[in-house]
Amino acid sequence: MEPKKSVVTAIAENVKQWAGQNGTVYYHTVTFVNGDSGSYGSKTPKCEKFTIGVEADYTKEIKVVGEYSNVIIKPAVIAQNSFSGGKKEFNQKAVIAQNSITNAVNFLQGGSAYDTANVITAAEVFYKWVCEKGEVK
């Protein structure tokens, strides 16, 4: 599903409800300038993710169950990388590795053991400890 972008022209709130095991889902019908229209399910009786007159990023999916088909509208989550404008991928291990290097440099700074090999060794110790304590896989 590729994200789309269009201005919301109409919202019919709380068209139907469904009581599920995680609480009630309230369905709203959302219509866009480009002609797309579909059902959006939320945890609140008021449609809070879309606003009439405001451009929205969304996805549209057609779900077929037996002889019935439903158009499902969902807000699109678009993560932007501020440097490249592309999608941003969060890599927890890379962040831990960067922090480990910084902490190793700070730990060894000014001592006689301050060389690249010792910094890498200390960083690996920090990295392993953090990953084990945080149960990072």
Image: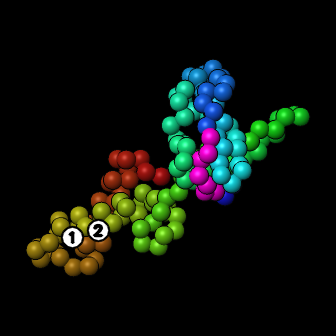
Q: Residue at x 30, y 63 (%)?
A: 100
Three-letter amino acid code at the position of disc 2? Ile
Colouring scheme applied when the structure was drawn: rainbow
- Asked if residue 34 lies left or right of residue 136, the reply is right
Q: How many marks?
A: 2
Q: Rounded to the nearest whole Å, what is the CA distance between mark 2 and mark 1? A: 6 Å
Front-most of 51 and 83? 51
Which residues make up the magenta segment? Answer: 4-10
Q: Residue at x 33, y 66 (%)?
A: 98
Q: Is residue 8 magenta?
A: yes
Residues tagged 2 and 1 counted as in contact (Cβ below 8 A): yes
Q: Residue 105 got which mark?
A: 1
24 drawn magenta: no
Q: Is residue 60 above or below residue 113?
A: above
Q: Which residue is mark 2?
A: 101
Label 1 amino acid? Val
Tell me: 136 left or right of 61: left
**Secondary element at image label 2:** helix
**In the depicted view, which residue is nearer to us: 116 or 23?**
23
Residue at screen point 37% across, 47% down = 134
For the point 55% across and 26% down, which residue is it?
A: 45
Q: Quadrant of residue 116?
A: bottom left
Query: Residue 44's spot in the image, x, y percent?
Result: 52, 28
Q: Give the structural element (helix, strand or loop) at label 1.
A: helix
Main secondary-structure element of the magenta-colored stretch: strand
